Image: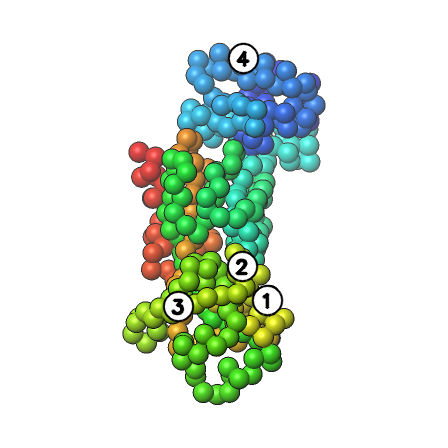
Amino acid sequence: MTSENLTGTLREKAVFVKAVELGSLVKTARALGMEDSAAAKAINTLEAREKRKLLIRDPKGSRPTAEGWKAFNLWRGPIAELLGAMKGDDDASPWRTWQLNLAFPSTSGAAVLTPLVAEFALEHPEYDISIELTHGSFHPLWNGVDLRIVHGVYTLEPCRQAQIASLKRIVTANPKLLPRLFSGKEIEPEELLNEMLVGDRDMVQSGVMRLIRNSDGFEKRLRVEPRLKVRNHLAAMMTALANPVVAVAVPELLAKRWIDAGDLAPVLPGWRCRPLPLRAIIPQDRPVHPAIPGLLEHIVGRLRESGEAEDAAIPKSFAAFFEEEEK
């Protein structure tokens, strides 16, 4: 289906719908077989006819205004059905996807969140999902990102955010390389200071390692002076797999495969590290993408089922949370 098959208002609305789905007028023009200037003119004509601003455009992409979201929800279905009737389902298929842009932390995003998004995508073929991986919650929200998940509180720009879960974290090592830690007698936390420790910056690089006793919640703080510092959970875990070192604050969900295989084991089964928070962030300058509440409910539900996430702080209804934020 190209723009030549469309005329008048239908063509303009089709260009608008596709621009919202793809997040770019340039991509829209290519998808519809038209010049960039023609796509821009179609949007200008549509906005003039509707007497309202529908699409925010800048060099990095395009996104709908609040009025644009209303128009998109109203026009998307009829446009897709009409195009399908004109040219058949195969030709109409490009109109049946809706772009959803996500950004996740590098390790937990790749190992934990992306597989869960894939499950959601299999159940929702109407979404075309793009995932970017980044490091640290101190990076600004990228243009066009509908949802970002980070570990810390985000303060760089106005946004909506809520904690959705906390991943359980453990102290682990390879029992084949450090058999003295797995002799059958449970060791005390202080004995870890005799080993080379590798771990996330909040547990090791700060010079203080904080452990919580499972039986009563008592917190113990140990002064540590690590000789090997890493800023990545996966790097710490892989280092412990290959060397006689102890990895601190590794997400249990990340290490599960190697623990089940016997290549890693919890060093302090009676203690746990502080959990790793997962916070959902969406931009403040545009309405919530309709897919986000359902996607987050899916992610949270699967994390809860795993038993390796602490769910005390999980909101009961993301849909209600985001709806309240919109008021």
Q: Which disc, if any, is residue 230?
A: 2
Q: Are marks 2 and 1 in contact (CB under 8 Å)?
A: yes
Q: Are marks 2 and 3 in contact (CB under 8 Å)?
A: no
Q: Quadrant of residue 327?
A: top left
Q: CA distance from mark 2 to mark 3?
A: 17 Å
User: What's the image's color scheme?
Assistant: rainbow
Q: Amino acid at mark 1?
A: Thr
Could you say where residue 67 lies in the image, as x and y percent from the top left?
A: 42, 24
State which tag comes first along the sequence, 4 or 2: 4
Q: CA distance from mark 3 to mark 1?
A: 22 Å
Residue 105 shows in the view: yes
Q: CA distance from mark 2 to mark 1?
A: 10 Å
Q: Point out the frontmost of discs 1 and 4.
A: 1
Give the residue at mark 4: 45
Could you say where residue 271 lies in the image, as x and y percent from the top left?
A: 39, 74
Q: Dot 3: within a 10 Å radius of its alpha carbon, few (fewer than 14), some, or many (20 or more) residues?
A: few
Give the residue at mark 1: 239
Q: Residue at x 46, y 60 (%)?
A: 205
Q: Nearer the viewer, residue 322 or 86?
A: 322
Q: Amino acid at mark 2?
A: Val
State which tag comes first along the sequence, 3 or 1: 3
Q: Residue at x 67, y 28 (%)?
A: 31
Q: Point out the frontmost of discs 2 and 3.
A: 3
Q: Nearer the viewer, residue 109 or 236?
A: 236
Give the residue at mark 3: 223
Q: Amino acid at mark 4?
A: Thr
